[in-house]
Amino acid sequence: MKKLKISIFIVIVLIIILIITFILIKNREEDLQYDANSIMEDRESMGIGEFSEEYLQKIDITELMQVNGCVEKFLEAININSSIYYGKDDNDEMVKVVDNSQIYSRAKDFLSEDYIDVNNIDENNITDYIQFVEIEQQYTILDIKKITDINPFQYVTYGIITQNDKFYQYKYFLITIDSANSIFAIEPLESINDISEVKGNQEIEIEKNFNNNIPIISMTAEDVSKYYFDTMKNILLYDKEHAYGYLDEEYANVRFKTADNLQNYISKNSEYIRELNLTQYKIETIDDELRQDRYLLVDQYENIYTIETDTVTDFRMRLDTYTIISDDFKETYDSADEQYKVSMNIDKWVQMLNNRDYTHAYEILDETFRNNNWGSEEAFEQYMRENFALHYDVEYTTYSSENSTYVQQINLTDITGETEGTISLNIIMQLKDNYEFVMSFSVQ
């Protein structure tokens, strides 16, 4: 009898344990389900579903530069004359310390396993798929898309490859970045017309080697400003057929009117554009949540450029600050006396000269004056290029006025300080409505 009671007790205890275990498992499943649902709800509330376009397009500048750095590491590897392949011999002379097979092996280290497997690439046939060069190359990303949203992250880029400051080719790349292991792989893309054609692959794995570590990127405000300044230059110099589309629409219609006019301006001034350097910058936030910023960029000739971003590769450019008059300018102008208004207008005209904008510098001249002296914009441009070839700073000297006609003497000096001497001009000006004016100047 006693044994029976013990047996019954044991059975009851086991049943209780089973019930408790079942309850715990059930609660755990519910907790897990809740966590999963909660995560999905959070992702949906942030607009970042499994492959949400809104999320995938939110790429910050550091992310962009890291991707660009990966591409440039690959481009360095396929340059058979790169400095990475040279070292000093016993006579302290620089000599190539690797052979072609080692160069091919290094380049192969950057390629994705998928790309290698699909094409059966090895050191013997890699030149059939990768175009090795003998010159340094740079890559400017014109468009980028993030196509996977969990590690490893994948990006497809479209951009310009340049060699020795000359356009080489447009190129698409697929870049996979394994942030957890700080490594990447790359795949040159062929027969692609748009980055939207490329789909992501979440299953891809990257094997670490001696070369495919992710470049370390640290961006300061100055670095970001310089990136946009250099990108602006590269678009004007190497993508001039599409450059008009990068301009702010209102600005483009007023300054250039047509894409052909912009291309003509670039062709005439390519050497001048190539030499531009960033000297000052200011960053203003338009919308912090949407990562929209305004960059005011100043070159060595004190020309001011404006870039407003929607995304890191979707932005609008203005190549000066005088074509579209700002509210600040209007406010200052409206409260100024006539002498100060004259000086503000002269400053705009000199900016046009410094910017090689002879079209608008010609248009604001008094019609009789310009017709008597040149008769065409082309003749005026030739005269200005011959007689005002430098970039100028303005000094205002004597001033007089009579019957709504204002005479301001100015001295122009080389803004770079590389040449001595001044050019003295008498500017004769009449002020019009709506911030407009006409002028003439003493012809040498």
Image (cartoon, rainbow, N blue to C red):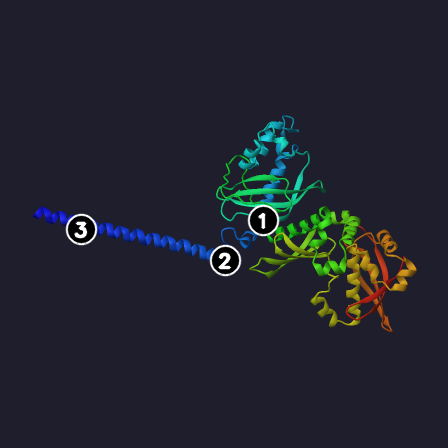
Residue 236's tag is none
Q: Residues within 10 Å of mark 3 (few under 14, many from 20)?
A: few
Residue type at mark 2: give it.
Met
Q: Which residue is denoted by mark 3 in the rendering?
A: 12
Q: Amino acid at mark 1?
A: Lys
Q: Position of residue 167 (x, y in %)?
A: 71, 42
Q: Is residue 247 visible?
A: yes
Q: Which residue type carries mark 3? A: Ile
Q: Is residue 175 above or below residue 295?
A: above
> Which of pointers 1 and 3 lies earlier in the amino acid sequence?
3
Indicate whether 293 appears above or below 327: above
Between residues 279 and 159, which one lies in front from this camera angle? 159
Q: CA distance from mark 3 to mark 2?
A: 51 Å
96 relative to 197, above or below: above
* Residue 64 at x, y percent in the picture: 59, 48
First in sequence, mark 1 or 2: give its number. Answer: 2
Secondary structure state at the residue bearing disc 1? strand
- Residue at 35% of width from left, 54% of height from top? 30
Which residue is denoted by mark 2 in the rendering?
A: 46
Residue matched to label 1? 145
